[in-house]
Image (spheres, grey):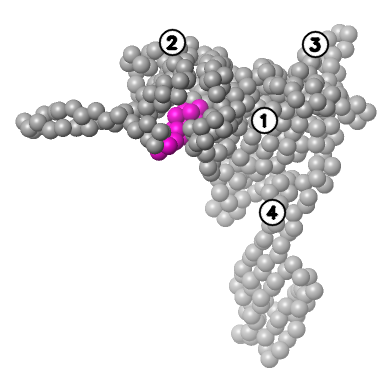
Amino acid sequence: MSANILKILGVFAENQINKDSVKILNQYLVEFMAAKRMDLICCCQSEIEFDLGAIDLPFEIECTNGKFKDISPNAKSNYQICISPHFAKIQSWFNGKIIFNHESLKSIIERMKTSVNYIIGTDVNGAPIASTVATDPYTPVFFDKKVQAYYNYQGCRIEELRIISPNFTLRCDNDHNDYVVVFLRDIQDLPYREQCIWKGFNITPDGRTFSKLFQKTIIEGKWNGVAQSIDFVFRDLYKTFVAKWEEKYGWKLFKSLNGIQAEYFNQICILNRDDYEALTDLVKYLSLLLQESLDLEMMEMIIPAKTEIKEKVVNGEKTKESTKEKPLSHLDRILETLNIEGYNFIVFLRNLQSLRSYMLHRNSKKLDKDKKRAFEYFGLNEDKSNSQSVSNNVLSLGATAISNMIKQL
């Protein structure tokens, strides 16, 4: 098994892994097989000597011309046996295989869904009240929004009112800055290990309520609500901008992302704690969506990029060197030609590019003029200690710049 799979299965202790075997708790293995819809094939091989009359074989055999063949009725097993007499002993070379079918994830969840209780309120003394089997399944349960960080990685998607992973889809109210709300029945439908993760972020209601989006969409059933969380706002504006641009001009300003990169869009999330590495990832995703995916070929067809020729001296001889216009300068001229006021948009992209460049060069201790301007633009401290607030600034400034573009389309 790969190291990643072993981590998923909870194999961490040194005494669980050695050169000959790996020990995995049966519960983890069964849940993993169910979630992946994966059957387990166990194979074995042995070469032994034994007295056939002295053992009780766990399978049926028939003998033909001194050779034995397995005739067990179990269709899931396959035994190949080669037996021959040698010095009054019988030698056996044994190859075996058996298939263990996976259970359905639903059946496992049904067995476990009431195994974790959650704080659902407080009594008159302020002590927490835990859910029981008699608790209304539609009781709202509140969690610190930091729990979302567990699902902001490849293979998972954090969307408006739901979190999607390879193992489950969770309906939730995540349109808040600092907390997530989930109905008790929905959180208890998660696999046991996921419930334990969420349990660690369980908080008391303390006057917290559903968001307007959740209230209107899920409670009232009116599917025209608008998200308020800045990460969802940015995503909605980006999709609107892309669609309106293509509708008006007949070509895509940004190329579509493919493969793993296609997942980056749903990983654009506001940070819930100061985490510079997470901020670096956020800036990477935004740079890919707004800069690296610019369709330069189409831009070249609309207005050719400028080429500047400069003379330089190499080894005492004068030579000419051509420099092509940078993409953002090229885009700025295209916007001007289309009578679009794109100043704020271009300023945002330039500062995003400078911040991304700084993050790629981790050993750069002294900020040059452009990078220092980017730090000031996004409000990032030189010690990078305020990543959480900066994530909000980046998304807010980006949303404002894109909104201004949409108004002109």
**Residue 14's spot in the image, x, y percent?**
58, 42
Examine the image and state in which quarter residue 352 appears. Answer: top left
User: In front: mark 2 or mark 3?
Assistant: 2
Give the numbered dot on residue 38: 4
Tell which circle, 1 or 2, labels the residue nearer the N-terminal end: 1
- Residue located beneath label 3 in the image: 207
For this orientation, the residue located farthest to the right is 134
User: Which circle, 1 or 4, is nearer the viewer?
Assistant: 1
Q: Which mark is nearer the camera, 3 or 1?
A: 1
Front residue of 264 and 94: 264
Range shown magenta: 286-298
Spatial CA span between label 2 and label 4: 51 Å
Tag 4: amino acid: Met
Q: Which residue in the structure is indicated by mark 2? A: 376
**Location of residue 236 in the rendering, given as x and y in whole percent from the top left corner:** 62, 26
Could you tell me how far apart the alpha carbons at marks 3 and 1 are, in whole angstroms?
A: 25 Å
Which residue is nearer to you in this view: 3 or 186? 186
> What residue lies at 36% left-to-right and 16% top-to-bottom?
370
Foreground: disc 2 or disc 4: 2
Residue at 80% x, 45% y: name it: 106
Instruction: Tell me which label, 4 or 3, sits earlier in the chain.
Output: 4
The C terminus - image quarter:
top right
Q: Residue at x 61, y 68 (%)?
A: 45
Number of numbered labels in the structure image: 4
**Amino acid type, label 3:** Gly
Does the CB distance between marks 1 and 4 fall below 8 Å? no
Around disc 1, counting alpha carbons within 10 Å, would you say few (fewer than 14), some (14 to 19), or many (20 or more)?
many
Helix, strand or loop at label 4? It is loop
Q: Position of residue 25 (x, y in %)?
A: 70, 46
Residue 198 against residue 397 in the figure, above or below: below
In front: label 4 or label 3: 3
Labels 2 and 4: the sequence-earlier one? 4
